[in-house]
Image (cartoon, rainbow, N blue to C red):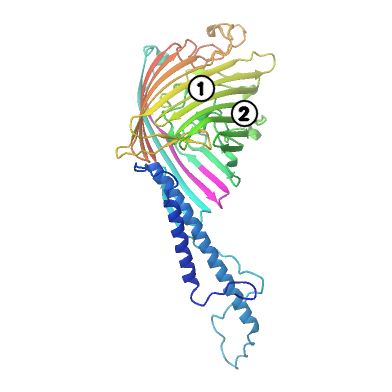
Amino acid sequence: MTESGILQLPQGKEMNFMQQKTKTILAVALLAWAAPTGPVLAEEPSNAQLYEMYLKLRDELTAVRAENRALRALIDARDQTTQTATAATAPAAAALPTGATPDAHPAPPPATAGTLPAAKDKAIPVEATVKQGALTFRSEDGNIVYKLDGRLLVDAGFVHNALDNNPKNMLHSNSELRQASLALKTTLYRDWEGTFDVNFANPNATVDGVKLRDMTLAYVGLPRTAFTVGNQKPQFSMEELSSSRWDTFMESGLPVLAFAPGRRLGATATHWEESYSAGASLFGDAWDKDASTDNNAEGVGWSARLVARPYVRDNANQVVHVGVNYLMQEPQSDATNNAVKINTGPEADLIDYKFLNTSDIPYTDSMTTWDFELAGKWNRFYAQSEYMRTDLHRYNGQPEPTFTGWYAMVAAFLTDDTRTYDLANGYFGAVVPNGAWGAWELALRYSMVDLNGVTGYVPKSAKNLFGYPVPIQGGGSTDATVGLNWYVNHNIIFRTNYIHVNHDANAAGSINATTGVSKFAGGDTLNIYGARMEYLF
């Protein structure tokens, strides 16, 4: 022991001491991890249990490595102090003889007592793993994580409809690149997370077919809490917030397609515990709107979501979920006369005909939506439903319509597999196949939406011809979907959907404001057959 209280190890034995301590800690960690804490299970552990064991052991090994580095730093600091003290007491170097050449590589001047050498960039060990099909790079100390998230979704299908002899309703089959996105998700110094996500296959994008998705920075330094800014989905709707990686069906239900706000520029705060999760968002326009050129104020909105879980068992393999959402949004800055428009097609993007369409509804102050969620999971079975109601608030004495919609779905795995439930975000998530032949899932869904918000006005055929007010009759539809999914492994999924669609008489698409003529013929019935190949990397 030195006078300063630093442990003095014999020369040449520091590394032996650290190696011995590391071995001891590892041995204790392994024994503690392996020691049973309850009755010994007679059954072989499942893949999920083995994965939990692996994560626990990895975290313990990371802690041992961190202590090892701390010991190294302590020894290096002691050596540096010893060298400084030696240099301070050494006699001054003798002057060089005349004509002598100094050393080409002289030793650096000794550090001033009480200072540390300047920090330098250095290589760090990196561990590469695959988690839920995504390639992840993690630094040895866990401070830096880079995750590559690529998605390729290819859809194909065909449609038959009852009114195919009507020139307005000659519908066409289609194939499309539904999504081709590449995202980089990062963790920096444990407390910061970032996402950079771009979709290269969006025909509705405004910049050369490229659509920005999540572009965010989040602070996660508090337990089970996140503060996120950037382009993101506001806190609204269980189905809307869930990842397209793990959607049960090829598209969301009708009310989600009609009423969800999509990604917006804004800020979000979330917190969760096992029994509940909560979040709130404040947002403005979509990223491709520009109030400075649109000559209108940016539309501002906010949302809040609260999820209660009165029953959670078996690591969320059995759960009851009840949620409520509220959404308020103003017309975006590119709106003319503060108009909003709600439209959607059937639950198949490859047959993307917007039969349900309110057309522009001008003089709108704001639009509010309530959303109620009910969901549950019991091992390989799960169910989910949402009911939504949207109210328009208008000025100049304009009528204020109300639109409604709901969906309900049930699903079951035909193999010994299950779908995870994400406690932090309050939605269903990944599927991790257990068997060599992957996981097979059968799902059913029924959904409806009613955009006939105002009744009692003149028929559409007479609209505007004699100066009457414009009726808001966007149409109604019901969709019944049967889906069969094959999760080959973490990275390859095949989905098939059959969708039976019934339209009311007003489901006729957009209306010409001058002539009152609709784009489609209402009252049609569609049968859609779709398939998707999903490649995740």
Looking at the rendered image, the quarter that the C terminus falls into is top left
Amino acid on which disc 1 is placed: Pro
Foreground pick, 497 / 5: 5
The residue lying furthest to the front in this view is 39
Q: Residues within 10 Å of mark 1 (few under 14, many from 20)?
A: many
Q: Is residue 449 magenta?
A: no
Q: Is residue 188 magenta?
A: yes
Mark with earlier residue (2, 1): 1
Q: Residue at x 45, y 15 (%)?
A: 520
Foreground pick, 421 / 368: 421
Amino acid on which disc 2 is placed: Gln
Start-end of magenta stretch: 174-196
Q: Residue at x 56, y 28 (%)?
A: 261
Please tell me whether mark 2 or mark 1 is closer to you in this view. 1
Q: Residue at x 60, y 90 (%)?
A: 96
The residue lying furthest to the right in this view is 396
Foreground pick, 528 / 327: 327
Is the C-beta separation of discs 2 and 1 under 8 Å? no
Is the residue 431 above or below the residue 95 in the image? above
Residue 182 appears at what percent x and percent y? 45, 42
Looking at the rendered image, the quarter that the N terminus falls into is bottom right
Q: Which residue is mark 1?
A: 255
**Residue 114 circle label:** none
Q: How many marks?
A: 2
The answer to whether residue 139 shows anywhere in this view is: no
Q: Which residue is mark 2?
A: 332
Location of residue 85 (image quadrant): bottom right
Spatial distance from mark 2 to mark 1, Cα to Cα? 20 Å
